[in-house]
Amino acid sequence: MADDVTGLSRRSFLTGRMPPPAAEAGAAAPLIAGIGAGCLAAAGVDCQLCRDACAEDAIAFRPRRGGPFLPSIRASLCTGCADCLAVCPTAAIQLVPAPDAAQEAARGAAHG
Ligand code: SF4
Ligand code: SF4
């Protein structure tokens, strides 16, 4: 969550892990968190550190057969604050351009 007029979260300020310049400059597409292949949960190791770090409740963990819950980003809630990037032990989270509304609606319909 942004804590002041700078738009930076307290964690980003303290850890020195800042959002990329494009986010600060107000690029066309806002940046949100994206979870990549290095995620421990995807590799079968139980980890939910990113969810615990997210003040916006923008990271959902969905059950699956035969393995730990998997994270997914709720794009509509993510502010791109980068707090989850700071805690991920494998640096599996990056800030990526937000999907447009049509893509998000289609994804929501596909996942129920
Ligand atoms: S903190 Fe990183 S490794 Fe852990 S569940 Fe989140 S994305 Fe995966
Ligand atoms: S960047 Fe990470 S911590 Fe910040 S709102 Fe998005 S999912 Fe939550």
Image (spheres, helix red, strand yellow):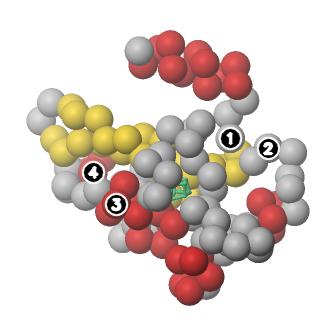
Front residue of this view, candidates 34 and 25: 25
Q: Earlier in the sequence, mark 3 or mark 4?
A: 4
Name which residue type carries label 1.
Ala
Residue 61 placement, left or right of 27? left
**Label 4 Cα neighbours within 10 Å, binned few <14 / some 14-19 / many ≥20:** some
Name the residue carrying label 1: 98
> Residue at position x 48%, y 46% from top?
58
Q: Is residue 38 above or below residue 63?
A: below
Mark 2 and mark 1 residues within 8 Å of each other at the beta carbon: yes
Decide if residue 17 is on the left or right side of residue 7. left
Q: Is residue 66 above or below residue 41?
A: above
- Residue 29: mark in rendering: 2
Q: Secondary structure at mark 2?
A: loop
Three-letter amino acid code of the residue under disc 4 = Ala
Which badge, 1 or 4, is on the more N-terminal residue?
4
Q: Which mark is residue 1?
A: none
What's the residue type where badge 2 is placed? Ala
User: Residue, x 63% and y 71% (percent of image)?
Assistant: 3
Most foreground residue, 11 or 86: 11
Residue occupied by mark 3: 52
Circle 1 or circle 4, nearest the eye = 1
Q: Residue at x 41, y 71 (%)?
A: 87
Secondary structure beneath dot 4 equals helix
Residue behind label 4 places its C-beta within 8 angstroms of ligand 1:
yes
Q: Which residue is mark 4?
A: 41
Q: CA distance from mark 3 to mark 4?
A: 14 Å
Q: Quadrant of residue 45?
A: bottom left
